[in-house]
C-alpha cells in the first residue's frame, strides 16, 4: 500500500493532534509533552505508517501500564505523577533519536517504506534496524519498570545481586525482565505486521523479516539490562528517612543505596536507547 508523503503529512497532523490532545486531557502528557509528542508523532507518520505504528505501540502500551497499580506505585515512587504525566524532556529522550533516524532513512528511500535488506542498502537497513532497536529498548525499559515494581518479589541490584528496596535504580526482578522481553517482542511483531501492507520485497527477503521478532525481543531485554546497569552505577539511589522512600538525590536525611549522582532517569534512558539503537543497527546489517 503506497501513499504519497503529502497524504501521510495530512494524516499525521490529524492523528497526532487527536492523540496529543487526548493524552494531555488524560494526564499522560503535560502541555510541553503534548506539543513535543505532536511534533515527534507527525514526523513518524509522515515518514511512514509503520514508523508511526511503532511509536504508538510504545506510547499507548506504556501509558496504559503506567496507570496500572497506581496506589502501589504512589507508595514507592517519590516522583510519582497522576497518570504518569510526561513532559517534553521525557518525550524527546524516548522519541528524539528515532525521529532523526526516520527522517534520514526516508530521505534516502524517497519516503517509501523498505524491507530490511542489506544487499539492497546497508545504510537504510542499519537505520531501520536502529529504529526497531530504539522502540524495543523504550518499550522494554518501560514495561520492565511499570510491571516489575508491582511484583511481590524483592528486587536485586543488577551489579551485586543483593536485595534492595523497591524503587532503587538498577533493581531487577524476574517479572520485570520477562516484561522487557515481551515488550521487545511486541515492537517486532508490530513492525512485521505493518510491513506486510507498507513494504514490498522479494519472497526470500520477506521470509527473512521474521527474524525481526527475536532481534527486537533481545533488544528489549538488553535495553532493560543496560538501563539497569547504568542506573545502579551512574545514577544515585538512597533511602530518605523523612519521606520513607527511595530518592534519586543525596541529602542530609538520605542514606546511600547505590550509584553516583551523574545522570538522572532521563539521562540514563537516553544513553541506553542510544546504545541499543546503535547495536541493533549494526546487527541488522549482518542479519538481514
Image (cartoon, rainbow, N blue to C red):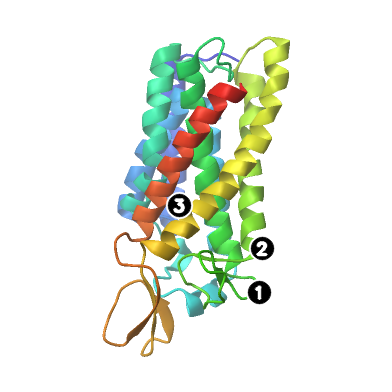
Position of residue 48 in the picture relative to residue 241 (left or right): right
Q: Nearer the viewer, residue 141 or 18?
A: 141
Q: Residue at x 36, y 30 (%)?
A: 100
Q: Secondary structure at mark 2?
A: helix
Above or below residue 181? Residue 160 is: below
Position of residue 137 in the picture relative to residue 252 (left or right): right
**Residue tagged by mark 1?**
153
Q: Residue 67: which quarter of the image?
A: bottom right
Q: Secondary structure at mark 3?
A: helix
Asked if marks 2 and 1 touch (Cβ < 8 Å), the reply is yes
Number of residues whose C-alpha sits closer than 10 Å to that of mark 3, classed few (under 14), some (14–19) or many (20 or more): many
**Residue tagged by mark 3?**
23
- Which image quarter holds the N terminus? top right
Position of residue 140 in the picture relative to residue 108 (left or right): right
Give the CA distance from mark 2 to mark 1.
Answer: 8 Å
Q: Residue 241: which quarter of the image?
A: bottom left
Give coordinates of residue 198: x percent, y percent: 60, 19
Marks 3 and 2, the one that precedes in the sequence? 3
Q: Residue 199: which quarter of the image?
A: top right
Q: Nearer the viewer, residue 45 or 276?
A: 276
Q: Secondary structure at mark 1?
A: loop
Number of residues whose C-alpha sits closer than 10 Å to that of mark 2, classed few (under 14), some (14–19) or many (20 or more): many
Give coordinates of residue 43: x percent, y percent: 39, 30
Give coordinates of residue 17: x percent, y percent: 41, 39
Q: Residue at x 32, y 50 (%)?
A: 88
**Residue tagged by mark 2?**
175
Amino acid at each position: 500500500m503506497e501513499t504519497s508523503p503529502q497524504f501521510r503529512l495530512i494524516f499525521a497532523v490529524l492523528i497526532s493532534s487527536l492523540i496529543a490532545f487526548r493524552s494531555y486531557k488524560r494526564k499522560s502528557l503535560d502541555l510541553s509533552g503534548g506539543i513535543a509528542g505532536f511534533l515527534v508523532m507527525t514526523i513518524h507518520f509522515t515518514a511512514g505508517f509503520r514508523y508511526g505504528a511503532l511509536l504508538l505501540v510504545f506510547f499507548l502500551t506504556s501509558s496504559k501500564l503506567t496507570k496500572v497499580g497506581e496506589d502501589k506505585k504512589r507508595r514507592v515512587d517519590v516522583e510519582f505523577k497522576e497518570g504518569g504525566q510526561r513532559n517534553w524532556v521525557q518525550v524527546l529522550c524516548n522519541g528524539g533519536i528515532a525521529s532523526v533516524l526516520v527522517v534520514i532513512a526516508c530521505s534516502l528511500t524517497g519516503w517509501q517504506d523498505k524491507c530490511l535488506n542489506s544487499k539492497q542498502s546497508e545504510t537504510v537497513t542499519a537505520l531501520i534496524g536502529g529504529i526497531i532497536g530504539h522502540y524495543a529498548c523504550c518499550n522494554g525499559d518501560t514495561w520492565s519498570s511499570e510491571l516489575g515494581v508491582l511484583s511481590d518479589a524483592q528486587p536485586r541490584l543488577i551489579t551485586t545481586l543483593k536485595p534492595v528496596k523497591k524503587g532503587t535504580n538498577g533493581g531487577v526482578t524476574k517479572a520485570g525482565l520477562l516484561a522487557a522481553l515481551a515488550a521487545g517482542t511486541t515492537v517486532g511483531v508490530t513492525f512485521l505486521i505493518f510491513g506486510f501492507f507498507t513494504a514490498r520485497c522479494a519472497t526470500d527477503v520477506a521470509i527473512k523479516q521474521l527474524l525481526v521478532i527475536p532481534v527486537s525481543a533481545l533488544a528489549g531485554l538488553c535495553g532493560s539490562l543496560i538501563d539497569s546497569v547504568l542506573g545502579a552505577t551512574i545514577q544515585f539511589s538512597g533511602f530518605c528517612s523523612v519521606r520513607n522512600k527511595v530518592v534519586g538525590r543525596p541529602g542530609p536525611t538520605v542514606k546511600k543505596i547505590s550509584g553516583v549522582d551523574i545522570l538522572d532517569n532521563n539521562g540514563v534512558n537516553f544513553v541506553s536507547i542510544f546504545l541499543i539503537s546503535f547495536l541493533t543497527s549494526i546487527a541488522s546489517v549482518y542479519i538481514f
